[in-house]
Image (cartoon, grey):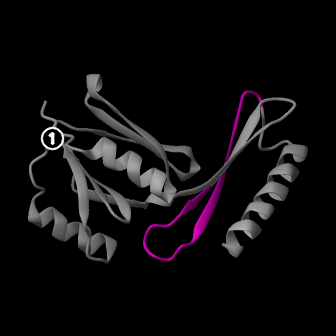
Amino acid sequence: MSFIAPRPDKSLLHELEQVSGRKVAVLAHGSGPEATVFATRELLALRHLGEWETWGWDEVLKGAWRAEQSTFTWTVGGNRKVEAKLDEVGKLPEVFRERVQASTVATEAHDLPRGSIQIVGRRRLDGSDEITWYTSASGGASLADPATAAFIVERTDALKQEWDRS
């Protein structure tokens, strides 16, 4: 396995521009026998078996490179897990982490009687400045609990007002 990824094939870049509807600035990429992953300024893109999927960085919740399995995995909205087997990873893990952090504008954690929740605001990196708000629960907290849901709505509304003023 090589950690230095060669330059991406120009035909793949052209395909990505067609799929995304814009000129792309690739910051890093990784490739494998069936998949190529591109990290651009505005989005994360996967080409797997000739099919494309793209996500704005505000939609990418978390991810990790697992060198021992040569697998790059990430989670997108709706807790969908995506996985790509890569032989060459280049700077993809570092750029991935930087782009996720760049899109994160607010993080607020709260301990509840049962478990905890985290509210995260993520900004689109395409120049629109639109913020998407996500909530996750852990340690026994349930987003379906009416009291928890009411608290989340109250805190998210307050955060939205705060960020609308900035």
Q: Position of residue 135 (x, y in %)?
A: 68, 49
- Residue visible at 39% across and 50% down? 98
Type of the residue with mark 1: Pro
Judged left or right of residue 52, residue 115 is right
Judged left or right of residue 22, residue 86 is left
Which quadrant would residue 22 be assigned to in this image?
Answer: bottom left
Q: Position of residue 48 (x, y in %)?
A: 26, 50
- Quadrant of the frame with the C terminus: bottom right
- Residue visible at 53% across and 73% down? 129
36, above or below 87, in the image: below
- Quadrant of the frame with the N terminus: top left
Q: Secondary structure at mark 1?
A: loop
In the image shown, does 59 or 80 lie closer to the viewer?
59
Residue 32 falls within the magenta-colored stretch: no
Furthest toward the right, the residue is 147
In the image shown, does 28 or 31 lie closer to the viewer?
28
Which quadrant would residue 7 be assigned to in this image?
Answer: bottom left
117, above or below 162, in the image: above
Residue 135 falls within the magenta-colored stretch: yes
Residue where numbered disc 1 is placed:
33
Tell me the magenta residue range: 121-140
